[in-house]
Image (spheres, rainbow, N blue to C red):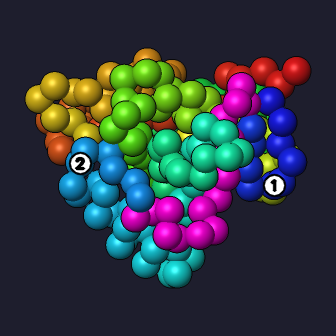
Amino acid sequence: MSQKERNEIADSGWKLQKVTDNDILFTFDCGNQDLNEYFQIDALLHKEALITQTYYLKATEELDLPVALIDLCNDSIRLKKFSQIPDLPENKRYPFLPSVKITRLGVSLPFQSLGVGSHLINMVKRLFITRNRTGCRFLTVDAYNNDDQKAIKFYQKNGFQHFSEKDKNKKTRAMFFDLKRISIT
């Protein structure tokens, strides 16, 4: 895995980088009208307001079309949500711990069900544990809680856990991944 620029990372022929040409957002189709519209309209507004940043996954240097899109923003987790974090000294316990939230994630139709979403999540994990600008302990997401629980199962498969069972009947479930679980070699 290589990381030439601060906001990009490459692995196994794939490259994750920040969207700089907004026109590529209009070539993206994940089959979900609401998500497509988010990336083509709302993501641009959120970027201008300095709320989120959109990254895209592409397969090769020659093909600059997005295989997947992901929107990220800063987040924090209340320490009270955790009963114990063993590697945090008692005198350094802050009320909130830094995290990055996955606000949206979509995979282009031809690449769905091929493991691309999981590869994207793993690249995002690596992005935040290598040459990180600030502390970032967790990735968070509010996963859609549909009848099929497809989104929740996807994030669970990628190591995310529920904060609690309090939101089990709500539209979304708050989930997290502790980046300290990844060893950097």
Work out whether residue 118 or residue 28 is closer to the camera in this orientation and state it.
28
Q: Please tell me whether mark 1 sits on a helix, a strand or a loop.
A: loop
Would residue 151 appear left or right of 50 to someone viewing this image? left
Q: Is residue 23 magenta?
A: yes
Look at 43% across and 21% down and name the residue there.
114
Indicate the quadrant where residue 18 lies: bottom right
**Which three-letter amino acid code belongs to the residue tagged 1?**
Arg
Depth check: give the residue in front, 13 or 45.
13
**Which numbered disc covers residue 32?**
2
The reply to whether the magenta stretch includes residue 72 is: no
| Crowding at mark 2 (Cα within 10 Å: few <14, some 14-19, many 20+) | few
Element at label 2: loop
Nearest-to-viewer mark from 2 and 1: 2
Task: Give the number of callouts.
Answer: 2
Q: Is residue 39 above or below residue 61?
A: below
Residues in magenta, as a range:
11-26
Percent x, y for residue 168?
A: 21, 32
Q: Residue at x 31, y 32 (%)?
A: 151
Residue 137 in percent (x, y) is at: 67, 41
Instruction: Please indicate, yes or no, whether residue 6 appears anywhere in the rendered image.
Output: yes
Residue 44 — which label? none
Quadrant location, the N terminus: top right
Q: CA distance from mark 2 to mark 1?
A: 31 Å
Left or right: where does residue 176 sit relative to residue 28? Answer: right
**Quadrant in the picture for residue 178:** top right
Do the residues bearing badges 2 and 1 touch, measured as CB atoms within 8 Å?
Answer: no
> Front-most of 67 and 48?
67
Percent position (x, y) of residue 116? 49, 29
Residue plotted at (45% across, 62% down): 25
**Which mark, residue 6?**
1
